[in-house]
Image (spheres, helix red, strand yellow):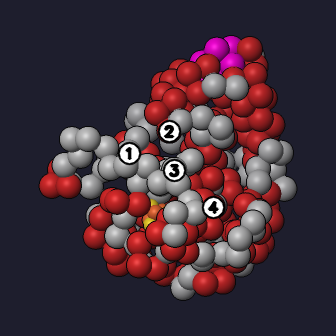
Amino acid sequence: MLERLGERYDHPAWSGPRLDVVSELVLTILAQNTADVNSYRAFTALRQRYADWDAVLAAPTDELEDVIRPGGLAPTKSRRIQHVLAEVKAEHPDWDLSFLGIVPLDEARDWLTSLPGIGRKTASIVLLFCFGRPTMPVDTHIHRVALRLGLIPPKTPLDRAHDLLEEVLRPDEVYAFHVETIRHGRHTCRAPRPICGLCPLTDVCAYYVLVQRGKAPVAPVPRGYDPAAGSPRYHDELLHGWAAPEGQR
Ligand code: SF4
């Protein structure tokens, strides 16, 4: 499955952190319940406005709220960002969270989830994207695709899917699975109806068995779809080329 999705989605492989750890943490807060493009805009605005994390922490909350408004839910997220930064600063005044790449995985996850408003998914994103640590962030796309394929039992709640998927994947498969499955969920295995006519996994998919029996809905292949156009691109990939302005890391 990974090999087939990899062919479709450019064989993603972890090749080093895309952002420093505090930036990744703040970005994941901005990304909660919003589209990537909006969180990217809000994150860029925040980094352009403030010289460093101390300045974000010291900013009036309503000012920060205005700056990150493009990311949605600005009143909640501005407070959450400042609460998290305050906790980080209290324990690590130099903003250096590199210990998260060294301590045992459970310990790193527990430290992150002890921060206000940081759950298992956000903690896993930070550990996977900053350090390549094999912990699976499960979002709504991964949850849906895993259920349809039958990788996890029917009706498994999203929270439980993190552990189940980590059990069936080798550590070196976690990053590729995460990225490929999100892309597949956005592009092909969509909610509420998947475009199974574009999928390379029909022969291993539990949902597709139901489709063939006429017991599950599918969406038609979009008119004008060009299979030779290359793999789909996503806003999250913008971030891989993002670099903080000089002196702002
Ligand atoms: S066959 Fe259809 S339901 Fe199954 S993974 Fe592919 S797109 Fe999703």
169 and 240: which is toward the camera: 169
Q: Earlier in the sequence, mark 1 or mark 3?
A: 3
Residue in the image at 69% along x and 19% along y: 65
Which one is in front in this view, the residue at disc 1 or the one at disc 3? 3
Q: Which class describes the residues within 10 Å of circle 2: few (<14), some (14-19), or many (20+)?
A: many
Callouts 4 and 2 close, C-beta under 8 Å? no
Q: Earlier in the sequence, mark 3 or mark 4?
A: 4
Q: Give the range drawn in magenta.
A: 63-68
User: Which residue is disc 2 drawn over?
Assistant: 36
User: Which residue is disc 3 drawn over?
Assistant: 193
Residue in the image at 56% along x and 21% along y: 70
User: Which residue is disc 1 drawn over?
Assistant: 234
User: Which residue is disc 4 drawn over?
Assistant: 143
Task: Tell whether 11 sits left or right of 95.
Answer: left
55 and 180: which is toward the camera: 180
Report helix, strand or loop for mark 3.
loop
Q: Which of marks 2 and 3 is nearer the N terminus?
A: 2
Callouts 3 and 4 close, C-beta under 8 Å? no
Report helix, strand or loop for mark 4.
helix
Main SS of the magenta part reads helix
For badge 1, the amino acid type reads Tyr
For badge 2, the amino acid type reads Asp
Callouts 4 and 1 close, C-beta under 8 Å? no
Q: Which class describes the residues within 10 Å of circle 3: few (<14), some (14-19), or many (20+)?
A: few
Callouts 1 and 2 close, C-beta under 8 Å? yes
Report helix, strand or loop for mark 1.
loop
